[in-house]
Image (spheres, rainbow, N blue to C red):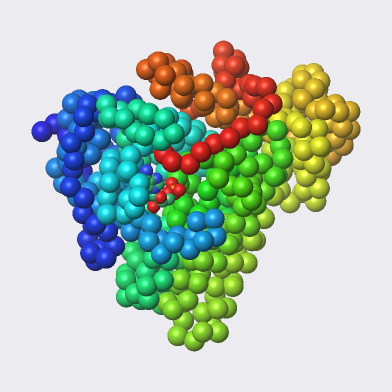
Amino acid sequence: MGIAIPFDNSYARLPPGFHARVAPKPVAAPRVVKVNHALAAELGIDAGALETAEGAAVLSGAAAAPGSEPIALVYAGHQFGQFVPRLGDGRALLIGEVVDGSGRRRDLQLKGSGITPYSRQGDGLAALGPVLREYLVSEAMHALGLPTTRSLAIVTTGESVYRETELPGAVLTRVAASHIRVGTFQYFAARGETENLRALADYAIARHQPDAVGAPDRYRRLLEGVAKRQAELIARWMLVGFVHGVMNTDNMTVSGETIDYGPCAFLDAYDPATVFSSIDRGGRYAYGNQPAIGQWNLARLAECLLPLLSETEAEAMEQATGALSLYADAFNAAYARGLLARIGLPEGTGDDRPLAEDLLKRMQAGGADFTATFRGLSAILDGGDAATVSSGFRDPAAFDAWARDWKARLSRDGASPGERAEGMRRVNPAFIPRNQRVEEVIAAAVGRDDFGPFEAFLSVLARPYEDQSEAVRWADPGPAAPYRTFCGT
Ligand code: AMP
Ligand code: MG
């Protein structure tokens, strides 16, 4: 046996009500099409071994590597506002945990490896297209510097998956700080299983709030930790123009990592009302609604924790309310800091937020591209032609007027234009997973078995803040066209 993964499985040791054991099942013709070598090294796993036939068996769920204890995790969740008392891993399997080179405990999960006790009407499978999409977007988010689950490998199964049409099946190996969701707490809270709820909270504290282990106020600190991490995460989403698309409570982690790349997509033109997901008809998860929905989800977590927070109801409520306002404050601070950095201004040197927000308003009115506009600002400071930015606005004069105010503001600040332009390039990406390019590389892989474009795009996205002049085509938003995404990885 060549596969040696240093498993150390803690979730499997939680009480039986937390998960269901799932036996490996054969897969027709598993073929490894991608291994993330850098991530494998971080995890202490030999990437070469993952690329063998034995690796294909393990990564498809056909065989369990030594030390692996495959389990499906149970959870509940509010889906588009409707509470579903039992969801769980219907198409995913936690094969185990490893402690990485930096001492961080990471989950290894297969996505699309077949039915589990929580599959409900689903087939437990994933199609290659959505698997490639999750790999690409999650790794792009990581390179952009956002907390996110990672992607370790993709295996095609040689089997068909039936959606609207017949599609090639695939399994993604996802790596996460954990898979504890708001919905995991909701599952036990809704069943009135307070001891399991407490066991879950203590487990989550050990993993994500280690400073609070054993402390009398540890549940409050856990809730506040989640509030802060989610506020900062969602601020980062807003700052890079990321639309998650399905922020159900079962898709919100306690770790603060972005999870579940289904219908997500990045903004091209800036518009807070942007919705990509075909099933989000009411725009509940529109770009501009994300901060508020994060707080709504957090309120659901706070409700679950009430019985643990304090014996007196009033005091528990006070702590819960405090966490919600902490979320709002943390979001506002992180968002303001990030937005100012995008226009090259440090925080706390004056009230510059209206200036930054004025640019957003003009971008919205002018149909301007979110990513390209911010990236273009550095070139202007370097002496480039402002028309390359203003031409992206329906009314270029609207941008020029803003740029005059902006330059006047910068002239009152000490930094040299060159230094400032450099600093801005570190926060304004040149490369994001542009929707049309994501579709293009998926079509090549799925339709022609050509993974070349996928690999090329992936390597561009690994260095999003570098100019990469040979890669300009990957930065092009393409023709403005409505873009629709679908759930169902
Ligand atoms: P999601 O919208 O991707 O967060 O998934 C919501 C729930 O539906 C989770 O419990 C999934 O495990 C389950 N689910 C989604 N697709 C499938 C599928 N093809 N087979 C079984 N369960 C699924
Ligand atoms: Mg989910």
Query: As displayed, is residue 39 above or below residue 14?
Result: above
Residue lying furthest top: 470
Give the residue displayed 23% in from the left and 39% down from the top. Answer: 61
Query: As displayed, is residue 171 above or below residue 23?
Result: above
In-image side of 367 versus 306 (left or right): right
Give the residue displayed 84% in from the left and 31% down from the top. Answer: 399
Give the residue displayed 60% in from the left and 17% down from the top. Answer: 472
In-image side of 439 versus 210 (left or right): right
Residue lying furthest front: 164
- The part of the image, by quadrant, that contains residue 100 is top left
Q: Position of residue 451 (x, y in %)?
A: 40, 19
Q: Position of residue 262 (x, y in %)?
A: 48, 41
Can I make out residue 97 in this image?
no
- Who is closer to the viewer here, 67 or 183? 183
In-image side of 313 versus 94 (left or right): right
Give the residue displayed 32% in from the left and 44% down from the top. Answer: 124
Quadrant of the image containing the N terminus: top left
Q: Position of residue 59 (x, y in %)?
A: 25, 35
Residue lying furthest left: 1
- Who is closer to the viewer here, 401 or 304? 304
Q: Position of residue 344 (x, y in %)?
A: 72, 37
Quadrant of the image containing the C terminus: top left
In-image side of 392 versus 244 (left or right): right
- Who is closer to the viewer here, 177 or 292? 292
**Number of on-image labels:** 0
Can I make out residue 430 in this image?
yes
- Who is closer to the viewer here, 303 or 279? 279
